[in-house]
Structures are given as structure tokens and as C-alpha cells.
Amino acid sequence: TLQRRVATSTQSLETRQTVAFLTYDYFINQVSGLSFTVNYIDQEDEGPGPTNPRDRSTFTASYTRAITRDWALNVGYQYERDDQKGFAATSDSVFVTLGRRFTLKP
């Protein structure tokens, strides 16, 4: 997905955003799969006055495995970067989630 949008902030400033999302899913077999996601957002104020450029990016790699019909285990790694006015911050994280799917019938 690639988007370009212009909006007005709560301080009545025009902002321009360029957004890019890329996802690749690979199904290993019927009960497991890999997922890779890259997200990028570039935001900048438009019009008169000082600009406030900011860009954020995220990379996520995860492995999902069905434990039972309703339960799944998800293990992964995420890297995030946030750059605002030349000050950059990065973070790395590893995650494990256990999820259950519920089906509600009327």
C-alpha cells in the first residue's frame, strides 16, 4: 500500500503524509507461517511557519503456529525507528503472544 494524504492538525496546520506498507506472508504448512512487514511514514507540516518533519519506520518478522484449532502461538522480532527534527530513536523488541479465537453464534 502506498498513500499520500494532506490533513489539518488540531492547531490548524496543514500536514502532508506519505505512507508505505509492505507485507509478505509465507504459509509453511496448514498450521504454521511466517510474516514480514515493513511500514514507513513521512510527515511534514505544509504552509507558512516552521516545519516539523518526522519519519517513522517499523520492521516486523514473526512466526505463527496453530497449537489447537482455536489456539495459536506467535513469536517475533520488531525494530522501530522514529526521527523527528533530526533526533532519532530506535528500539528492538522480541515478543511472544498466545491467542485464542472465539466464535459467537446467535
Image: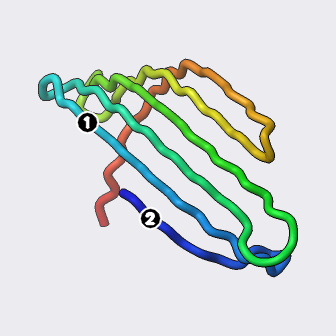
Residue for point 32% across, 26% down: 64
Give whichever of discs 1 and 2 has the lower sequence position. Answer: 2
For the residue labelled by badge 1, is the local secondary structure a helix, a strand or a loop?
strand
- Residue 31 x/y as whole percent: 19, 26
Residue in the picture at 49% in, 68% down: 4
Mark 2 Cα shell of 10 Å, populated few (<14), some (14-19), many (≥20): few
Q: Residues within 10 Å of mark 1 (few under 14, many from 20)?
A: few
Question: Which residue bears the numbered disc 1?
Answer: 25
Q: Relative to the observer, which residue lies in front, 32 or 85?
A: 85
Pick whichever, 105 or 73, lies toward us: 73
Q: Residue furthest left?
A: 29
Q: Quadrant of residue 61?
A: top left
Instruction: Answer above or below: position of 54 versus 73.
Output: below
Q: Is residue 78 left or right of residue 25?
A: right
**Label at residue 86:** none
Label 2 sits on what residue type?
Answer: Gln
Residue at x-position 30% and y-position 35%: 70
Where does the image place residue 20, in percent across and percent down from the top left?
44, 53
Residue that carries the numbered disc 2 in the rendered image? 3
2 left or right, relative to 29: right
What is the image's colouring? rainbow
